[in-house]
Image (tube, coloured by chain):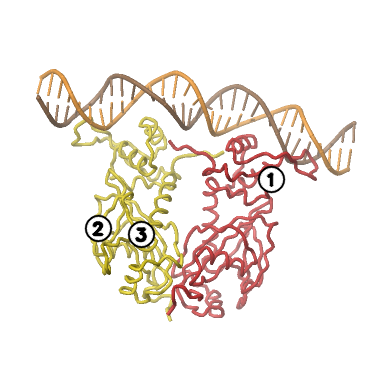
Chain colours: A red, B yellow, C brown, D orange
Amino acid sequence: MRETSNHELNPNVSVDNVILGFDDDEIKVLLIERQPAGSSNGSLALPGNLIYDDETLDQAAKRVLMELTGISDIYLQQFHTFGDPGRITKKQDIEWLKAVRAHPEARVITVAYFSLIRIDEYEPTPSAFAKNAIWVPVDEVKSLVFDHNEILNKALVDVQQKLYHQPIAFKLLPEKFTLAQLQRVYEIILQTELDKRNFRRKILKTGFVLPLDEKQQGVAHKPATLYMFDQSKFNGGLQVSHF
Amino acid sequence: MRETSNHELNPNVSVDNVILGFDDDEIKVLLIERQPAGSSNGSLALPGNLIYDDETLDQAAKRVLMELTGISDIYLQQFHTFGDPGRITKKQDIEWLKAVRAHPEARVITVAYFSLIRIDEYEPTPSAFAKNAIWVPVDEVKSLVFDHNEILNKALVDVQQKLYHQPIAFKLLPEKFTLAQLQRVYEIILQTELDKRNFRRKILKTGFVLPLDEKQQGVAHKPATLYMFDQSKFNGGLQVSHF
DNA sequence: TTAGAAAGTGTAAATTGTACACTAAGTTTG
DNA sequence: CAAACTTAGTGTACAATTTACACTTTCTAA
């Protein structure tokens, strides 16, 4: 009988992480190639695994990410829990579970987390059952294991929503950034083009993006002013009045 | 060994429902009194219970609500999953679990759902381990079992957010309603006062609230025009431009 | 020195937000 | 049946925000 504070894997609950990365160009998602992979012409998955009975869900998400990809110290945010009994139907998935899990037939629900990071600030190094960890542009993602495509899509939609209310754009940029970089983040996440002058006016009026006494270096054109995000001025994001 | 499609209770996963009700006056939450209650000077809980291994989370939420309160046919929306190993610390809770659960020591994570309904359109009738089902004004809710206070609070915050993007205000009103009623819903959920003229202008401009050729009846003053919500015109809620 | 490339800036017109108070249309009461 | 009561319903002036739009500046590299 499992006890509340036993350090044992819970066969019924897993976490999955949607790590979205940005490289000043496009949004990519961090995927792992599972090992063993059975026939495996490389089946890809979100980094996720069962939780321990003595850790919180947030801790589990962090730990699992660390164990599979070596990435730590990032802020993970829970966004949805997936639990269709029919999540696991693909033959490859079933075989993989049999090879890896103590209770391969158990009903598993998974709590999904996302994070946004700069690709160049982390170096994923696969371990545990991840034989590879790779960044894949989100619109080039093919079929993933289990219901991971569904999880990824929901993450992308939720991130769009949260862009207005949470300072997530800045997690995709270096500490010091230009307004052009910031605009690009908004454009890529929202999948739309924005007017440069209007964007600048609006962003600067919020007060949570501060200019520095510093310019971009090493560019073959007029160097842009660098800016910083000021967390303390961020009160619920872009101001919006509904009434 | 549990199988994916067995009709057995999963000892590790539960659902909890935050049913918010409105009676044209204030927001109340539907709570149950558990049976057996031990020493119990009436410990109150959100209606929730373990899931079966062969049902989806959404199905489980519906079923559990039905079994405990008799309420069915309402739209339940998942909003967060709670899973601290320390969720269960109160002595009363532990005793109750021992009396009722096959695996009282099991680590349980709970997937929380909310719904908004009109109080006068439902008649909660307690059954299963609910010896009572009552509506409690949300600001009169005292200490609940487990972490149910935390779950309720998160539900209330999330509902505020979603009011702008989802047509949830209309679930708290009869099919035909006056603009004063609608305004009251917004005011109560947002905990703020709104200007009557500005509210009307803004709501009517959205196009998803349509006037009927019908007036309020049986009131001791000028009868108000009745309105309907038009789902098909609702595109993401109140229009807001961020850039 | 010139060409290239992105930075940075302003304005006019339309729309939306805000604050605010009286008249209209019923019912109830005396 | 008149008066009192209660809520419905409406408009406007001013401020703020949104939108659309193009040229000059400043740096590097050739």
Q: Position of residue B74 (x, y in %)?
A: 32, 56
Distance from label 2 to label 3 (Cα)? 14 Å
The image quadrant where one finds the C terminus of chain B is top right
Residue at 32 percent across and 65 percent down: it is B64
Circle 3 marks a residue in which chain? Answer: B
> What secondary structure is marked by label 3?
strand
According to the image, label 3 marks what residue?
B17
- Name the residue nearer the viewer: B23 or C5: B23
Pointers 1 and 2 within a single chain: no
According to the image, label 1 marks what residue?
A177
Q: Amino acid at mark 3?
A: Asn
Name the image quarter holding residue A67.
bottom right
Q: Is residue B62 left or right of residue A193?
A: left
The image quadrant where one finds the N terminus of chain B is bottom left
According to the image, label 2 marks what residue?
B124
Distance from label 3 to label 1 (Cα)? 44 Å
